[in-house]
Image (spheres, rainbow, N blue to C red):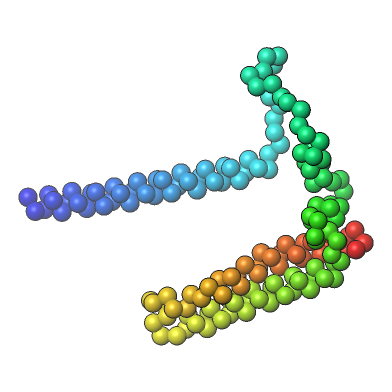
Amino acid sequence: ARYTTISTRTFQVKHNKTTKMAKLSFMILSLMVAACSAFVQPSSPMRTSSSVAFPTTKQSPLVVMNAEDTFWEGEYPPSKVLGPIMSKMPSGMLGMLSIMFLTICVYSCGQSFVLQQEPGALASGSWVKWYYILGGFGGPLAWGTHVAAWIQRKNGM
């Protein structure tokens, strides 16, 4: 009877792991399909009926104008896609901000690495500091500001 209990328990553990892996695989596959569908052009609607369940209402001009503001033709967008603040900043200043954010990110990652080398730091979690985590966000900010600097440079600012 004891052997049966152990084998049943082992089966339950394996079954739970299999179930978790199936759920994780489904989640990853769903995210991949969603990410890929973002790059596909929308197809024409299949429905040709003239009756519509929800008739379209006229949107306010402000909403339509915002949707048109982010569209551009050519190699680079106009400065207005950067928003009200960054569209007025020169490319040199945005470049300096990008360098500053990148420096903060590299410093934070380096200091976290130094703290990880202390004995027992990984086991206790003492190497995790909030200010190094905050500094880690400098990487995406550096990328965004360098793209903004490129846009401003292409637009002659």
- Residue 11 seen: yes
Quadrant for the C terminus in the image: bottom right
Residue at the image position 52 percent from the left and 83 percent from the top = 114
109 sits left or right of 23 in the view: right
**Picture quarter containing residue 156?**
bottom right
151 sits left or right of 24 in the view: right
- In the rendered image, residue 88, in percent from the top left (x then y), is placed at 86, 61
For the residue pair 3 and 44, the one nearer the viewer reads as 44
Q: How many marks?
A: 0
**Position of 41 relative to 94 (above/below):** above
- In the rendered image, residue 38, in percent from the top left (x then y), is placed at 65, 42
**Picture quarter containing residue 40?**
top right
- In the rendered image, residue 91, in percent from the top left (x then y), is placed at 85, 66
Residue at the image position 59 percent from the left and 70 percent from the top = 134
**For the view shown, which residue lies furthest in the left direction?**
1
**For the view shown, which residue lies furthest in the top direction?**
50
- In the rendered image, residue 135, in percent from the top left (x then y), is placed at 61, 72
Residue at the image position 76 percent from the left and 32 percent from the top = 59
**Position of 35 relative to 136 (above/below):** above
**For the view shown, which residue lies furthest in the bottom direction?**
118
For the residue pair 3 and 41, the one nearer the viewer reads as 41
- Residue 46 seen: no
Residue at the image position 77 percent from the left and 65 percent from the top = 146
For the residue pair 75 and 83, the one nearer the viewer reads as 83
